[in-house]
Image (tube, coloured by chain):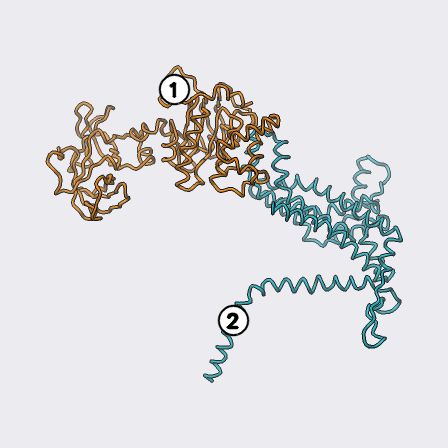
Chain colours: A orange, B cyan
Amino acid sequence: MSTQASSDGESQVDYTHTPWLDPSATPFIQIKNINKQFGAFTAVSDVSLDIYKGELFALLGGSGCGKTTLLRMLAGFEKPSSGSILIDGVDMGGIPPYERPVNMMFQSYALFPHMNVEKNIAYGLKREGVAKAERTERTKEILNMVELAEFAKRKPHQLSGGQRQRVALARALIKRPKVLLLDEPLAALDKRLREQTQFELMNIQEKLGITFVVVTHDQEEAMTLATRIAVMDKGNFEQIGTPAQIYENPRSRFIASFIGSANLLECTVVEREGNMYSVSQSSNSQAILVEYDGDLSIGANVTVAVRPEKIRVEKRSAVSSAVADGHNQLNGIVKEMAYLGRLSTYHIVTENDVMIEVTSPNQARYRDGNHPIDWDDEVTINFAPQSAVLLTE
Amino acid sequence: MAASDQSLKRWYSKFTNVVHRNLRSLIVGIPFVWLLLFFLVPFFIVLKLSFAESIIASPPFTSLLDWSGGGFPEISINKDNYLYLIEDDLYLRTYLNSLKIAITCTIICLLIGYPMAYGIVRTQGTWRYILLLLIILPFWTSFLLRVYAWMGILADQGTINDILLYLGFIDKPIKLLYKPIAVYIGIVYTYLPFMILPLYANMEKLDSSLREAAMDLGANPVSTFFTVTLPMTLPGIIAGSLLVFIPATGEFVVPDLLGGGNVLMIGRLLSSEFNANHDWPLASAIAVVLLIVLVLPMMLYHRVQASQANS
């Protein structure tokens, strides 16, 4: 039943296309007030989400956040305790997994160990009653796509992890489902292969135009792959948005620290001038200037979040007066330093005893091998008011 | 004193060296010697007996080696026991009947045991272990006692007849005991755990995501069972079937106690040749042929497995 998706599914995905911003667009997958209880435990609590056709949507979160349960409800392996799921306008309530226009790539790959690669891939078509000739042809076609043609007769245990991953992908794609669900698709691969496979997945998704829903705990993976990300925590969506939106405008402290790393400073608002807020950590500490579009009253408790790479660090002796414009400039001492090649990470303790993490690209080549900023160096750090985010949640 | 201490130490280190070097062969060797002593040697004794002649003496058989001529002993091999097994069709009928009963019971055990094992594996938490314990529980009582209990259940005035009479389904007791059905019931009852346990062990390891993957790819529950679950549990089915089939073929107690003289089974015949007729050589020949009948399918199975592992 999932073959119908192929005719209009071949179109190219337009990456400038943002259907979620268009209020007239009809979502392809509609998750409406889904709730899932396992006994007394709430795995997913009253979530709603619209996913549009051709999206590569990522559900991101730590273990036990409910992301896999949500995926399994889309596949039909779990029944929602309440709420409904619509795929292409059809209510999935009461439709068993084997009748859904959805295929899943399992985290363990779940390849049938007693069948060879070819039979594994053709399994779905055989169940659908596709004639043998067409089955063979389509299997061959997809084997070529995942570059496994010469492994057709091998058993799964005779393949490497990466090859198994591609068989699992081919098996899930061959029925041309309306939606492909991927449960931690790259978790079992080593780092190098994972990076390579990420781009392969994106290419395939682009080529076939199938809507992908990916579950992952790896935020880098989610940011690389996804058009949009829903960050989940304790069965709720913490934030839904494009990778850049989530990274640059985290909605809460949880998001700010979960996606990438952030310096979180507990402050109170002391002054306001338009959208320029002056906040400070304590009465005697230096005020921090942050641009913020919301409305906050004087004395409100806020958190300032600054990404480590948005802070500049310079040796105090080298600071020119031009750079030191007085905004958000703090003096400190380097307590820890890690040289990572393309960048270095510093842990700097400021004059009022706050630890700030700063990462800085190593643009110049240190020919003598000595790092210009080293342990116990006195440094000055500063960041623009626009680089910090004020969080109230 | 010091000198003997030294030599003792040297001797000890030499000893441990030898032990370490030979530990591997020692570990492999112990079960090897065990099997040799308690399996292969008795087998050869039985094999030797099967080629002897029955006489009225103690022991009641002739020796294969005749030393009376002096110098080299004369070897006298008597093939009559095997020829007799072919001549009298009682033996062939008994072998075939044993195989028929064993195969039927194996299939019945599989049909009952498979869903039971599947059910136990699918049960969550403590209940699974309670169910498993119930399967093993009968082993805590003597097998013989349990067969006697079945005599009580199946007898004319037994439990089954009492219940059926009380409920009015029958007006006179139906004959169960000393009929083939009693033997079938007894063997299935006795060997069911041997079917369930290997199946359970096999199914427990079965990855549930494989079943989900099949469903996800469009297989309904029936199709999922036949294309994934059944092939994946085949090793358990084969192991369980062999564990039931092999002892059931040579079963003695059940046909003797529940079948009376009415059910021909090779174990019973062997026992009567040995005990009642005192024909040890013929009894040995029966045992050797039984062994061949049982070992052949086993060897075939191993052959198939080995070739599968190689491909």
Instruction: Classify B80 as above or below A200.
Output: below
Foreground: A121 or A257?
A: A121
- Residue furthest toward the front? A150
The C terminus of chain B sits in image quarter: top right
Chain under numbered label 1:
A
Residue A205 percent location from the top left of the image: 44, 27
Judging from the image, what secondary structure is the residue with disc 2 in? helix
The residue singled out by tag 2 in the image is B16
The residue singled out by tag 1 in the image is A19
Residue B21 percent location from the top left of the image: 53, 67
Count of labels in the image:
2
Q: What residue type is labelled 2?
A: Thr
Residue displayed at 49% across by 83% down: B4
Res B121 seen here: yes
Taking A123 as reference, is A190 left or right?
left
Chain under numbered label 2:
B
